[in-house]
Each structure stands twice: as structure tokens, then as C-alpha cells.
Image (cartoon, rainbow, N blue to C red):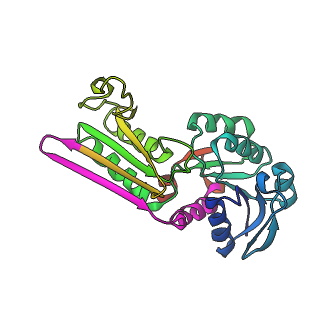
Amino acid sequence: MIRVVVSGAKGRMGSCVVDAVSAAQDMQVVGCYAPLNAGETVTCADGTLTCSDDLAGLLDETRADVMVDFTQPDVAADNVACALSHGVHVVLGTTGVAPERLAEIQRQSSRDGARLFYAPNFTTGAVLMMQFAKMAAKYFPDAEIIEMHHDGKKDAPSGTALQTARLMGEARGHVRNVGPGPETETPGHAGARGCEEDGIRIHAVRGAGFMASQEVVLSSIGQTLTIRHDSTQRESYMPGVLLAVRSVADLPDGFTVGLERIMGL
């Protein structure tokens, strides 16, 4: 039985993680960390748990094997460092912390072989979208990413969009788009062409009508190719989260990025 502490347990994603983990036959929610909701209870298939504002104490008390973190970028790094320093593996779904920073945290904080797994996106469809975009990138001189998320998302562009651009940039040899960039923007309208990551333009849309969607639009003379993925429910992330919880302890590296690494892609 894998003993799991959920960090951000009262949030929208955290609540889904609590339900999914408690429903799994091979794992158990043993603790809930939610400092802004300390003292409140969370009820799930594993019983009723009281939210804690003391992560270190919670990890020791529960003898957790894995911590799952879906919180905010400004606190996630400290949460990760705390768990790793207590010898607890981490599955991180919070975006907005640079992978280089996460790798450094893992090197400095890990005790007893604790591993850190980070995925910009835990939906299997989004991972496949990124892989398809990577395959197509070297055949198209221009590519743009349009990502659309709910208006409560704290980071822009999304971690998924950045990771997609990095994979595509690597596939086509880190060559910039042939088409125009910010040099064509009308004076006084900076940002009209989006931002750039590894030569690829990214546009971030935020609105109450979205949850999580992304389009990759590739173009060359006389043709375009559009690859799109939509998540309409947060439950779509849970199979990937559970796969990561089951896999993190056996990963060969201390720090691993991307669900594709454990999907066998």
C-alpha cells in the first residue's frame, strides 16, 4: 500500500487527487496539507482527515511514501524541498517553477533516495499531443501554440505550452520560425505576436469558459496542420497522477520530467 500525502488537498485539483488516490486499491491518503484551511476536514474513501499547516510534522507523523503537490508556484518549491528532505518521493503537478530550479532542489534536498517527478500536464491526451507536435515540427518551418485556460490559472504561458515548444524546438534543431515575430507588432501593441520559446510563438488565452485546451498550429507553403487537445473535467488528469504515484519510487533518475517518460513513449 502506497501511503500518500496530498498537498493542496482543499483546492480544485487537490480534491480530485484525494478522491482518486483514496479510490485506488493500492494506495491510501494518509494526510492532507492545506495551510489556509488548517483544521478543516476532508472526507474521502479512506475516511475523514484534518488538514494540517505543518508539512514536516505531517510527513513524519503519517510515514508517507509519496507527496502529491497541486498548489501554487510561490509555495510549491518549498513543499517539494520539505518532502524530499524527509525522504518522501514527490509527484509535482504545480506549474510555474522552472525545471532547472526543481532539479537543483532535488539535488540539494533529497534524502534516502527520494525522487522528484514533475509533469507539466498529467492528461494522457495532452502528452500524446505534445509527442505528435514534436514529430511534426521538423517538417514545418512555422509553428504557433495557442493555449486556453480558466481565468484562475496563475501562470502564463502554461507549463504544457512551454514543454511543447521545447520538445518541438529540440526536434527541429532549435531553429526559429521563418515567419515574423514581434518586429511586425503595431507600435503600442507589444505582445500581439505572443511570446517565444525555442523559436516558437506562444499565445495564452484566459477566460471563465475554459478549463484547459491547447492547439498547435504548424504551417508551410500551401498547408497547415492543427493538433488540439481539450480537457473538460479535472478527472482527466487522475489516471496520469496515479501512474506517477505508482512509478516515482522506481524511476532511474532523481529528477524526471514528463508523463511520457513513464508512459513508454
Q: Residue furthest front?
A: 188
* Residue shown at the point (52%, 57%) measured from the top left: 122
Could you tell me residue 175's position as x and y percent? 31, 30
Could you tell me residue 192's position as x and y percent? 35, 33
Q: Residue furthest left?
A: 222
* Residue shown at the point (83%, 59%) measured from the top left: 63
Magenta-span inclusion, residue 222: yes
In this view of the protein, can residue 254 be seen by the observer? no
Could you tell me residue 106's position as x and y percent? 68, 40
In this view of the protein, can residue 90 be seen by the observer? yes
Relative to 215, is 155 on the left or the right? right
Nearest the eye: 183 or 260: 183
The magenta stretch is 219-248
Relative to 121, is 109 on the left or the right? right
Magenta-span inclusion, residue 118: no
Could you tell me residue 216's position as x and y percent? 33, 48
* Residue shown at the point (33%, 52%) measured from the top left: 132
Indicate the quadrant containing the N terminus: top left, top right, bottom left or bottom right. bottom right
Relative to 191, is 7 on the left or the right? right
Indicate the quadrant containing the C terminus: top left, top right, bottom left or bottom right. bottom left
